[in-house]
Image: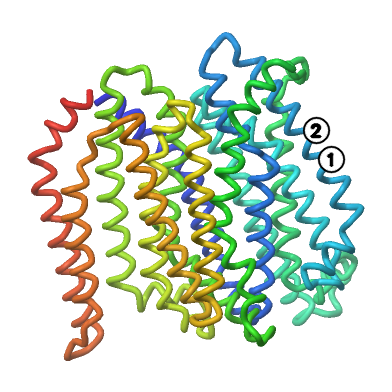
């Protein structure tokens, strides 16, 4: 029970700034989708898809390797210095190459007039990559409050500068063109930069975060142990493949979509609509992200416990229940939820339930990944992720030309479902865990039944529909609570 309480408390503390940050950043989406056209927001969607891919490449599994090797207390300082030095060198090399080739890359991306996009994102990536190890060390040292404070500063800076550049500056120039404030703003603000100010705001926030993390980096620790680095790289390189394949699964559709549709302008608009509607699955994404922050070090911490497998089973069980409840909470009120994005983006509502279920499968896969991380069979985990990437590539090439962004959404769901099944079947051979999937399947079928009932036509006003949906949601929660209350004590006793 103490272990579950610890996981819950750390998820809450680590999750609070993450949830707050993601929530507030997602709350910028209504601003973006009302200020910018779908094709303009398509630029943001595409650029951040590339960033997600490159970030995995630049960190090359070193964060997980840090957790794995630093868990041996006497080597923690050496592991910290080795991993940080390694990431620092590779990030600086990345900056040099990217700045030199920025004009070439901008042409290849289709933004020949904006090589500065490439430079800004190179700085963001390098800064964030180096920051991963100080962040990870705060988590390993159980300093969630310090972690939270740094995260919150990052959030406030990013949102504040977005509002400043996208709302305040244009407002002052439009309404007070002769004022002193307008004169000062004119020195650095250029309206034609447009969506570029989203990137600039991110860059400023990343630099501020890095400055705040500098006190966590003792200069005497900045040395790499060659033998240790070799061991860490042997452990982490399959995780790099795993991460790259995973990010292909997550972002490849947004990278390739414009290339698979014949009309470039319409393709960018579809990309913008898809990217905005992707954000609507915010609650599921937030929960999974915050859960992962606490769960990964928790996996390694619990590995020495004789009841570790029962603990992992209990974690999976309640994780699925929460995700199913989130799915219903979004889909039963989807008309209200879609007000989150601008009117011209709402035609993409059909992708939301598909992407929510895809995220659920991805979250289950993250839980299942405990077996290859604890048994050091990261190569097998990488192979599963590569297989998922192959499925993603194939299905996107087949489905996007036919269904557009709906094809991309279904490709994502099928990919994550396939990876989940593969990981479970293989993992049971190497690290068998008695997961209660029978009960999870029952809850899932009830969830889908409620969802399909909710989309049936209802006579009366919208309020009648919401009343019926609310009754179904409360009934589902009551049903789950009734059965889980009876078995919770036995699950806890078995696990702890």
Label pair 2/1, CB-CB below 8 angstroms: yes
Q: Residue at x 72, y 30 (%)?
A: 214
Establish if 246 lies above or below 252.
above
- Decide which of 91, 373 is in the foreground and name it: 373
Which quadrant of the figure has residue 296? top left
Residue linked to disc 2: 89
Marks 2/1: CA–CA distance: 6 Å
**Secondary structure type for disc 2:** helix
- Decide which of 397, 335 is in the foreground and name it: 397
Q: Mark 2 Cα within 10 Å, few/some/many (few <14, many 20+)?
A: few
Residue linked to disc 1: 93
- Decide which of 178, 154 is in the foreground and name it: 154
Q: Is residue 75 left or right of residue 479?
A: right
Quadrant of the snapshot with the C terminus: top left
Quadrant of the snapshot with the N terminus: top left
Q: Residue at x 83, y 46 (%)?
A: 95
Give the mark count: 2
Establish if 431 lies above or below 468.
above
Q: Residue at x 16, y 75 (%)?
A: 468
**Secondary structure type for disc 1:** helix
Q: Residue at x 31, y 54 (%)?
A: 323
Q: Is residue 432 left or right of residue 85?
A: left
Q: Mark 1 Cα within 10 Å, few/some/many (few <14, many 20+)?
A: few
Establish if 213 lies above or below 115.
above
Q: Give percent across and percent down for residue 124.
A: 74, 50
Q: Give percent across and percent down for residue 78.
A: 67, 15
Q: Which mark is residue 54?
A: none
Which quadrant of the figure has residue 463? bottom left
Q: Give percent across and percent down for residue 7.
A: 36, 32
């Amino acid at each position: 029970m103490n272990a579950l309480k610890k996981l819950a408390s750390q998820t809450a503390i680590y999750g609070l700034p993450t949830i707050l940050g993601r929530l507030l950043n997602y709350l910028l989406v209504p601003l973006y989708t009302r200020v910018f056209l779908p094709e303009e927001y398509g630029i943001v969607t595409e650029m951040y898809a590339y960033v997600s891919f490159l970030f995995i490449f630049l960190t090359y599994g070193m964060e997980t390797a840090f957790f794995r090797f630093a868990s041996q207390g006497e080597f923690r300082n050496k592991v910290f210095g080795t991993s940080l030095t390694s990431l620092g060198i590779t990030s600086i090399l990345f900056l040099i190459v990217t700045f030199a080739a920025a004009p070439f890359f901008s042409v290849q991306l289709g933004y020949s007039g904006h090589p500065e996009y490439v430079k800004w994102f190179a700085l963001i990536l390098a800064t964030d990559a180096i920051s991963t190890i100080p962040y990870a060390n705060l988590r390993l040292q159980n300093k969630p409050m310090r972690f939270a404070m740094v995260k919150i500063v990052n959030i406030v800076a990013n949102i504040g500068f977005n509002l400043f550049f996208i709302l305040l500056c244009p407002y002052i120039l439009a309404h007070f063109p002769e004022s002193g404030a307008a004169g000062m703003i004119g020195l650095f603000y250029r309206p034609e930069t447009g969506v570029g100010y989203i990137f600039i705001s991110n860059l400023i926030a990343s630099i501020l975060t890095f400055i705040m993390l500098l006190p966590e980096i003792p200069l005497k620790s900045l040395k790499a142990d060659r033998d240790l680095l070799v061991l860490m790289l042997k452990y982490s390189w399959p995780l790099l493949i795993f991460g790259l394949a995973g990010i292909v699964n997550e972002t490849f559709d947004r990278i390739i979509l414009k290339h698979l549709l014949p009309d470039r302008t319409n393709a960018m608009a579809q990309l913008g609509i898809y990217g905005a509607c992707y954000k609507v699955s915010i609650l599921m994404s937030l929960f999974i992200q915050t859960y992962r922050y606490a769960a990964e070090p928790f996996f390694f911490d619990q590995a020495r416990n004789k009841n570790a497998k029962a603990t992992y089973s209990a974690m999976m069980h309640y994780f699925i229940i929460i995700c199913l409840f989130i799915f219903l909470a979004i889909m039963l009120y989807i008309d209200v939820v879609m007000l989150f994005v601008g009117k011209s983006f709402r035609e993409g509502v059909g992708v939301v339930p598909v992407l929510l279920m895809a995220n659920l499968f991805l979250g289950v896969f993250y839980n299942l990944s405990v077996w290859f991380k604890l048994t050091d069979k990261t190569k097998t985990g990488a192979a599963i992720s590569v297989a998922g990437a192959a499925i993603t590539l194939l299905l996107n090439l087949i489905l996007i030309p036919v269904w557009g962004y709906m094809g991309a959404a279904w490709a994502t769901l099928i990919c994550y479902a396939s990876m989940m099944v593969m990981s479970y079947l293989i993992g049971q051979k190497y690290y068998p865990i008695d997961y209660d999937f029978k009960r999870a399947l029952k809850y899932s079928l009830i969830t889908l039944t409620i969802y399909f009932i909710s989309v049936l036509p209802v006579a009366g006003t919208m309020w009648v529909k919401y009343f019926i949906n609310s009754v179904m949601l409360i009934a589902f929660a009551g049903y789950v609570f009734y059965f889980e209350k009876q078995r919770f004590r036995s699950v806890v006793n078995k696990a702890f």
